[in-house]
Image: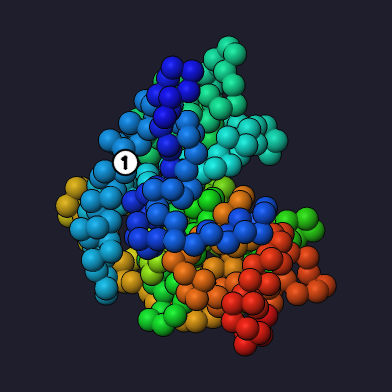
Amino acid sequence: MCIGGKSVSNNHYVPRLILRKFSDKLSLYNVRTGELKENIPPEHAYSIEGFYDEETEKKLNQRIESQFGGLLSNLILKQDKEISLSRSNLLLVKKFLTISMIRSVKGEDWMKKEKDFYSLCGMPTPFEEKQIIGETSFEYWLRTLNVILDTDGTPGQVINHPDKTYPAYRWACIVNSAYLAFWDAPNDRDEFVITDIGMTSENEKGWDGIRVHNRKKLDFIQNLIKSTEDNNEREQLLGLLYNVTSFSENFQMFPISSKRMIVLISPFFKFRYFMKSSGVTVPELSDLTVIPNEKLFEPNRNHYVLPPISGKGYQYHEDDRYIYDIKVLNTNEIRYCNALFMDRIDTYLGFSSLNHALGGIIMYKRLNDPPYIPRVNYTNLYKIIDERYMGSINI
């Protein structure tokens, strides 16, 4: 398409390579208009003309989507028991997840808040950010996105980029401090949904964002810091405290097909797993999360080529392997996860078909029955379901 003599591309803020793994045709519910459209080709979903400039669109294709698309099709979605990633595979996945968060439809608005994160929290900035006179919020968002695209997405490379931004560095730290998991939909009717935000997360049980915040994990770590007299242990705990302060949620979820998603899990749960294995009393999962399934939070297995260095841990090598057992959610777990996706949305809720999304939609309504007030109004979707299923669904 041409606007003002310039060619304008139709840019996807949720990658087509992901949408195609959901279905050949998608159903999209518009929460603003209450309209459900079905049989939408992935090419016409989650896209805006001129969302990026041409250079950024080209970088997205050349520096992340083509590589991740190959990894997705040839490895990640081919396995049904376990997924074994190389060091470069792991970095590619984490880079893709970082970019997925930044490139979302609300990315520009989000960057305005993220730019001032350190000052608002009273934390020292990790470096002096380059100031560009006249830079708009859109240009700052594009700069942040391009910093990740130009690097491998790790904090070490981001901080050495000449155009680095605070959000690029902060989210590189968050994503790379977390560990991965792969959660599958059960082998029945339920499938994952996908929104225009592209991801969602779970806060601690009882969190409301106003009076109750994500303090349980932090309080446990701080109590350990107070009780230890070992300086090395204290330093490790302080590092964990910083990471868990940044990654305050329990986990973040990114659907990569209608039947599988990648999950970033807070480093707290890996620490909790090993502490529990050594006999230390740790917080019960049921106090932290609505899905207290220990297997879902088990960390991956690592096979390192080189031996560890005393006091520094393992040395990384390209032939290291990171092995993940694929975890299958039960019916209640996938419906709860879908309800979380439904709660973080700008305009569009997508699914392969209404029948496959039905369980999660019903759970969202029940989780938000009075006296709770839902963040997103799905009243018209409930009416569509009632009419289509002729009142046979108790919604």
Badge 1: residue crowd in 10 Å (few <14, some 14–19, many ≥20): some
For residue 247, above or below residue 335: above
Q: Amino acid at mark 1?
A: Ile
**What kind of element bears circle 1?**
helix
Residue in the foreground of this view, choosing between 362 and 95: 362
Residue 294 seen in the current view: no
Q: Quadrant of residue 369?
A: bottom right
Farthest top residue in view = 133
> At x 54% / y 50%, what residue is drawn?
197
Image position, residue 17 (x, y; %) = 34, 51
Among all residues in the image, which is located at the extreme bottom?
392
Residue 278, image x and y in percent?
43, 74
Q: Quadrant of the C terminus?
A: bottom right
Closest to the observer, 92 or 47: 47
Q: Quadrant of the N terminus?
A: top left
Residue located at (73% from left, 56% from top): 209
Percent coordinates x, y for residue 187 in the rendering: 38, 81
Which residue is pictured at 26% across the width and 43% down the height? Answer: 66
Regarding residue 198, the answer to whether it shows in the image is yes
Instruction: Write down the quadrant of residue 224 in the picture.
Output: bottom right
Number of dots carrying numbers: 1
Q: Give the residue pinned by disc 1.
A: 64
Apparent side of residue 10 relative to residue 350 in the rendered image (left or right): left
Give the colouring mode of the picture. rainbow
Residue at position x 59%, y 77% in the image: 388
Where residue 291 sits: x, y (%)? 55, 75
